[in-house]
Image (cartoon, rainbow, N blue to C red):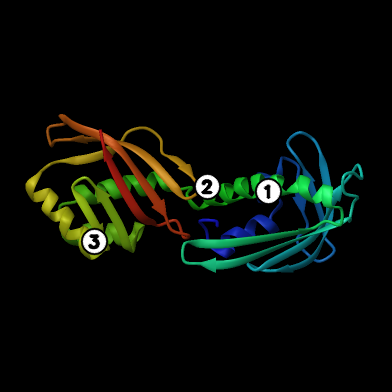
Amino acid sequence: MIHATPESVFRFFTDSARWAKWWGVGSTIDARPGGRVYIRHPEGTESVGEVLEIAPARRLVFTYGYAKGTPIAAGGSRVTIELTPERVGTRLHLTHDIPDIAARDEHVQGWRFQLSLFANVVADEVAAKAAALVDQWFDAWAEPDAQARSTLLTAIASPHVRFQDRYSNLEGLDDVLPHIAAAQHFMPGMRLRRAGDVRHCQGMVLCDWIASKADGQQVGKGTNAFVLDPTGRIEWVIGFWG
């Protein structure tokens, strides 16, 4: 499962720069039937192949083997990748047809590792503006104008966004917006600001924050976990105080 749309995922099969991000520097793909597939693994091993089928945002089939001829000869196996859209992203199903059982078993964990790395590389691109999203989320909580606050949150968050911390258990913007208004009423001038860089992994963003009064006095700190949807909008936030 990858936290991105099928279109975003598929770009990493058609663009050599993106292809190299999940295989290794120097890897290339000519994304057309008969096009060359070249993979240079980080430790220097070279894999080669040829594109057999390609269907945008749905399917990629290519031959796979090693330039040195072992454990799989060039053209000696076939990889099929299929993409299926789901609510939380894209389901990637990979089949590697390898005639030799021993060689097949050697590749099982290798593909688990490679596809995990791939999923995160794609999610990293979707979350490229995560720091700005986080800043805008905090800005919305400090925005005194109700219409401006609604416009800001609508632009960065899912309409079904969930927010939870020790004081909040909210679902949907229709729940979040009046809660922010109440927070401003009972804690006037309070605002949260990001403290340091965000960290991202597989569609989840972690951000440390500092809470301050209107006069700048720090009154709290903590960490928020932001889950992004396949388009990069905020879907779920959990806040941890302390």
Q: Is residue 161 left or right of residue 25?
A: left
Position of residue 144 measured from the top left corner of the image (x, y, whole percent):
15, 52
Disc 2 crowd rating (10 Å Cα; few below 14, some 14-19, many 20+) is many
- Which of labels 1 and 2 is toward the front? 2
Q: Secondary structure at mark 3?
A: helix
Q: Is residue 138 left or right of residue 41?
A: left
Q: Could you give the CA–CA distance between mark 2 and mark 3, rounded to whole angstroms?
A: 27 Å
Q: Which residue is mark 2?
A: 124
- Which of labels 2 and 3 is toward the front? 2
Mark 1 or mark 3: whose residue is earlier in sequence: 1
Q: Residue at x 83, y 47 (%)?
A: 102
Q: Residue at x 12, y 49 (%)?
A: 184
Q: Residue at x 44, y 56 (%)?
A: 232
Quadrant containing the N terminus is bottom right
Q: Amino acid at mark 2?
A: Asp
Q: Residue at x 64, y 50 (%)?
A: 115
Name, please, the residue furthest toward the left.
Answer: 186
Name, please, the residue furthest toward the front.
Answer: 101
Q: Which residue is mark 1?
A: 17
Q: Which residue is mark 3?
A: 150
